[in-house]
Amino acid sequence: MSDPTLLVLSSLAGGDKHGYALMEDIEHFAGVRLGPGTLYGAITRLEERGWIRPVNSKDRRQPYTITGAGREHLHDQLANLGRVVRAGMRRLENA
């Protein structure tokens, strides 16, 4: 899975994070290194859709949190992805 939107949402589902922490977490759990342009482009799109929002911080780094709508979207997308994975695995077994 390399869709930056799902990767960012999946990372934030585990807790609030700022940009660098998101990049590190995504690389750790997905093996994908998002560049800054890709990451911040995804963050902008996710904010515009209301799926994440910035949280107050005394630090200069801006943390983000997933919203209820973001959790719902992530759940739906992962459920769809799960169906694709199960179908692909069945087909491989029958090949």
Image: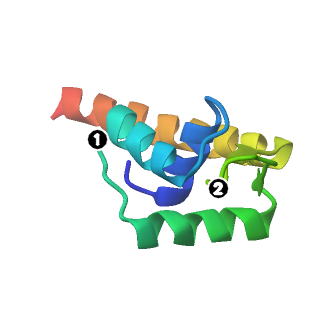
User: Residue, x 61% and y 63% (percent of image)?
Assistant: 43
Asked if residue 20 is positioned above or below residue 24 in the image, the reply reads below
Tell me which colouring the rendered structure shows.
Answer: rainbow
Asked if residue 75 is positioned above or below residue 18 in the image, the reply reads above
Secondary structure of residue under mark 1? loop
User: Residue, x 76% and y 46% (percent of image)?
Assistant: 57
User: Residue, x 74% and y 40% (percent of image)?
Assistant: 71
Is residue 21 shown left or right of residue 44?
left
Q: Which numbered marker is on residue 60?
A: 2
Please identify the quarter of the rendering in which residue 45 is found: bottom right
Q: Which numbered marker is on residue 31?
A: 1
In the rendered image, residue 74, in percent from the top left (x then y), is placed at 65, 43
In the rendered image, residue 76, in percent from the top left (x then y), is placed at 68, 42
Report crowding for label 2: few under 14, some 14 to 19, many 20 or more residues within 10 A (C-alpha): few
User: Residue, x 61% and y 46% (percent of image)?
Assistant: 9
Front-most of 20 and 2? 20
Q: CA distance from mark 1 to mark 2?
A: 27 Å
Which quadrant, please, contains the C terminus? top left
Is residue 9 shown left or right of residue 73?
left
Mark 1 vs mark 2: which is more N-terminal?
Answer: 1
Amino acid beneath label 2: Arg
Amino acid beneath label 1: Gly
Asked if residue 22 is positioned above or below residue 36 in the image, the reply reads above
